[in-house]
Image (spheres, grey):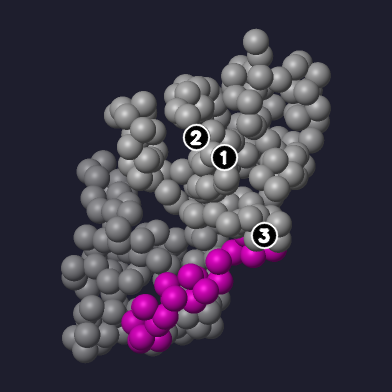
Amino acid sequence: MAAHTEGQFDLFMSQLRETNATLDFYCDFPKIARNVAEIEISLNTLNYLIGKENLHEAVEALWNRDKRVFDVMDILIATRKKDDKKYIDNDGSMHSVHSLFSSVDGVMKFIEGTGLDNVFKNKEVKDLVDYVFGVETGLDTNARKNRSGEITETLVARILDNAGIAYREQVSSKEFPAIAAVLGADQKVFDFAIKAEEKTYLIEVNFYSGGGSKLNEVARSYTDVAPKVNGVPGFEFVWITDGVGWNSARNKLEEAFAAIPSIYNLTTIQNFINTLK
């Protein structure tokens, strides 16, 4: 017997939200500021290059004073040393961008090849610290996917707090020998665990504003995990998920919806709260 009816699934899908983003989702300014602060001294030193007509002479002067300041130049083209970005030379050979910062000629090749020479000479940038703050802001958009999950977990935690529900976060399945036994190699760290009078609820939380193969994998995984957890006396698996990205994986979600009794979105989560109370 299916855990839910087709009508219940249709209602669930109609309730999915376009976004879970709060205003602090878009940019993590404290992290951006920390990244800039780590290289601020070098950037201030490189400001010496701004407005110089003879850049080779200026680069050589800085090199002789402290060649380490050039180690941060990757960020001026929105890359990082750890990314180890490559480029193709005129002869077709491939090199690491960061390898250019091992000599004055290499630094000049970087500056001229990227077009930074005109940026410096024409003073199109007034201060490299401010410029890199902008670059870091742009790079920070790559972290939004991770923040989306964190924001949903924070939102669910706030809902539980407001309802006076005690919970623990990031709880390993290994804490429960019976659960660890049924999961076997598929051990998990659940986003939340709530110990009620009659049972312990093990909860997974996520949000998908866009599609992708990961949604099918998640739905398939939880469809497998839920009956294993629910088969252990005193435990129940709960899945709280939302986001219009599920429209692209509707069939897989419907299969999960039919197999998992306790599945909620951010609209129906109050039903779960009522169950706990």
User: For this rendering, which residue is in front, 213 or 150?
Assistant: 150
| Label 2 with label 1: CB-CB less than 8 Å | yes
On screen, residue 163 versus residue 167, left or right, reads right
Type of amino acid under label 1? Glu
Among the two numbered marks 3 and 1 on one chain, the one whose residue lies closer to the N terminus = 3
Viewer-nearest of labels 2 and 3? 2
Q: Residue at x 44, y 61 (%)?
A: 78
Q: Position of residue 175 (x, y in %)?
A: 35, 45
Element assignment for label 3:
loop
Q: Which is more toward the observer, 126 or 262?
A: 262
Q: Which residue is mark 1?
A: 198
Where does the N terminus fall, quadrant-wise?
top right
- Residue 79 is one of the magenta-drawn residues: no
Per the image, the residue denoted by label 2 is 234
Spatial CA distance of label 2 from label 1 is 6 Å
* Residue neighbourhood size for the residue with mark 3, other residues' Cα within 10 Å, grouped as few (<14), some (14–19), many (≥20): few
- Mark 1 crowdedness (10 Å alpha carbons): few <14, some 14-19, many ≥20: few
Q: Inspect the image, locate mark 3, and give the three-letter code of the amino acid beneath it.
A: Gly
Residue 139 position (above or below residue 181): below
Query: In the rendered view, would you say 174 is above or below 233?
Result: below
Please tell me in which quadrant of the rendered image residue 80 appears. Answer: bottom left
Q: CA distance from mark 3 to mark 1?
A: 18 Å
Q: Is residue 90 above or below residue 110?
A: above
In magenta segment, residue 45: yes
Write down the residue under mark 3.
Answer: 164
Q: For residue 217, say whether it is visible.
A: no
In percent of width and height, residue 271 lies at 74, 40
Residue 3, image x and y in percent? 66, 19
Please say whether residue 177 is visible from this viewpoint: yes
Kindly identify the residue that appears in the image at 68 percent across and 36 percent down. 264
Q: Which is nearer the N-term, disc 2 or disc 3? A: 3
> In the image, which residues are magenta?
23-46
